[in-house]
Image: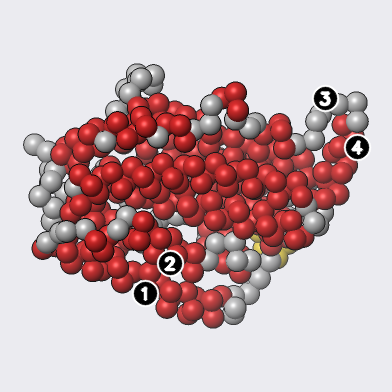
């Protein structure tokens, strides 16, 4: 027997939520254009020195010289972002929960989106990996070990197999990565590395299209099932959105993710304030306040509308606490402290 989504006290079962996911398939099909056609898609090579050119040595030299301007702090954040991107196989497995693609070549719109999305995301880790390797600024073996461990440890978006929660989670994460890559790019430009600025900019552009897709699909869900959508949104936020890279492990620092997150906060790449602003954005974009719901969903609606305010207050306290954090050694940069 199909179990109801009990945590939300929602009357719809998971099977009925999957029916809604199937019912919005025409919207999925209409938004497949958010994937770039293959002929127009960028590839990592477009942003890297041309190793086939006669002048490859000069190109690599210039690339490495520009990268010398990037601070250790920014490198640590970039490695953490890259490791998170490189764990893509885990996210593809998780998102398969939206569509049962048992054969792997299902022609249905959801399956086509997920394959196209995976193909676009696959370039992010590739490009950041190549940048870091070519610059010679980081201890690549330590970075690779971290990626290997993260993929092997798996990933749990805490969605409890609920497709609505998966959509909320992914819309949130696409916006978070867009902000984060965009910020790294802007800081890199300030430091004096236009190559890294371009690289992060083009990746952030992909994340923006992906964000648009998942945000629109969740809006479709809310049209079909406002109460269920609101309850799923609240249940994701109550658990605090679990970050995809949180199990990263370099075999040295048991709190590696937390230490990486501190540096991301301190460099203003991704902060508690950003977390709050994403929640605020989603609450507004999905018109949570305007949905006609009753009972438990109405209570969830109230709670969601107050969330970002709560996190904004937390942001002030967090910033103060972080100012007191001592510098930490990162294996990724040969134990230099940041
Ligand atoms: Fe990505
Ligand atoms: Fe993404």
Q: What residue would you read off at disc 2?
A: 276
Residue 324 in the image: x percent, y percent?
59, 80
Residue in the picture at 32% in, 35% down: 27
Image quarter of the C terminus: bottom right
Q: Which mark is residue 232?
A: none
Answer with the quarter of the image where residue 33 lies: top left
Of the image marks 2 and 4, the number of the one nearer the N terminus: 4
Q: Dot 1, how many residues are within 10 Å of its Cα: few (below 14), some (14-19), or many (20+)?
A: few
Of the image marks 3 and 2, the number of the one nearer the N terminus: 3
Q: What residue would you read off at disc 1?
A: 310
Q: Dot 3, how many residues are within 10 Å of its Cα: few (below 14), some (14-19), or many (20+)?
A: few
Dot 1: element: helix
Asked if labels 1 and 2 touch by Cβ distance under 8 angstroms, the answer is yes
Q: Dot 2, how many residues are within 10 Å of its Cα: few (below 14), some (14-19), or many (20+)?
A: some
Residue in the picture at 29% in, 32% down: 25
Of the image marks 2 and 1, the number of the one nearer the N terminus: 2
Dot 2: element: helix
Of the image marks 4 and 3, the number of the one nearer the N terminus: 3
Asked if labels 2 and 3 touch by Cβ distance under 8 angstroms, the answer is no
Of the image marks 1 and 4, the number of the one nearer the N terminus: 4
Residue 39 in the image: x percent, y percent?
60, 23
Q: Is residue 284 left or right of residue 303?
A: right
Q: Is residue 20 left or right of residue 11?
A: right
Q: Give the distance between the C-alpha atoms of the residues marked 2 and 1, in whole angstroms.
A: 8 Å
Residue 169 in the image: x percent, y percent?
37, 50
Is residue 321 placed above or below 235 in the rendered structure?
Answer: below
Image quarter of the N terminus: top left
Answer with the quarter of the image where residue 270 lies: bottom right
Q: Is residue 325 left or right of residue 198?
A: left
Q: Is residue 301 left or right of residue 281?
A: left
Ligand 1 within 8 Å, label 3 CB = no
Asked if labels 3 and 4 touch by Cβ distance under 8 angstroms, the answer is no
């Amino acid at each position: 027997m199909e179990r109801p989504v009990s945590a939300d006290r929602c009357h719809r079962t998971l099977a009925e939520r999957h029916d809604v996911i199937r019912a919005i398939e025409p919207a999925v099909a209409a938004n497949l254009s958010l994937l770039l056609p293959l002929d127009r898609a960028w590839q990592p090579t477009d942003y890297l020195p041309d190793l086939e050119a006669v002048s490859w040595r000069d190109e690599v030299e210039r690339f490495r010289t520009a990268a010398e301007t990037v601070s250790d702090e920014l490198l640590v954040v970039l490695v953490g972002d890259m490791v998170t991107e490189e764990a893509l196989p885990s996210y593809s497995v998780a998102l398969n929960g939206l569509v049962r693609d048992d054969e792997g070549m299902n022609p249905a719109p959801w399956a086509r989106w997920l394959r196209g999305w995976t193909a676009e995301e696959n370039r992010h880790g590739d490009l950041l990996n190549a940048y870091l390797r070519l610059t010679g600024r980081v201890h690549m073996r330590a970075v690779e070990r971290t990626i290997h461990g993260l993929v092997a440890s798996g990933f749990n978006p805490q969605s409890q197999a609920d497709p609505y929660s998966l959509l909320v989670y992914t819309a949130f994460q696409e916006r978070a990565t867009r902000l984060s890559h965009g910020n790294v790019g802007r800081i890199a430009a300030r430091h004096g590395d236009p190559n890294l600025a371009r690289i992060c900019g083009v990746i952030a552009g992909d994340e923006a299209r992906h964000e648009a897709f998942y945000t629109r699909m969740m809006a479709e869900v809310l049209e079909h099932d406002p109460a269920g959508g609101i309850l799923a949104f609240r249940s994701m936020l109550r658990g605090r959105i679990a970050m995809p890279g949180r199990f990263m492990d370099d075999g040295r620092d048991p709190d590696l993710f937390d230490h990486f997150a501190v540096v991301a906060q301190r460099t203003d790449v991704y902060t508690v304030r950003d977390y709050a602003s994403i929640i605020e954005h989603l609450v507004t974009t999905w018109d949570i306040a305007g949905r006609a719901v009753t009972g438990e969903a109405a209570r969830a609606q109230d709670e969601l509308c107050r969330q970002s305010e709560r996190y904004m207050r937390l942001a002030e306290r967090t910033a103060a606490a972080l100012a007191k954090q001592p510098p930490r050694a990162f294996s990724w940069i040969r134990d230099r402290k940041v």
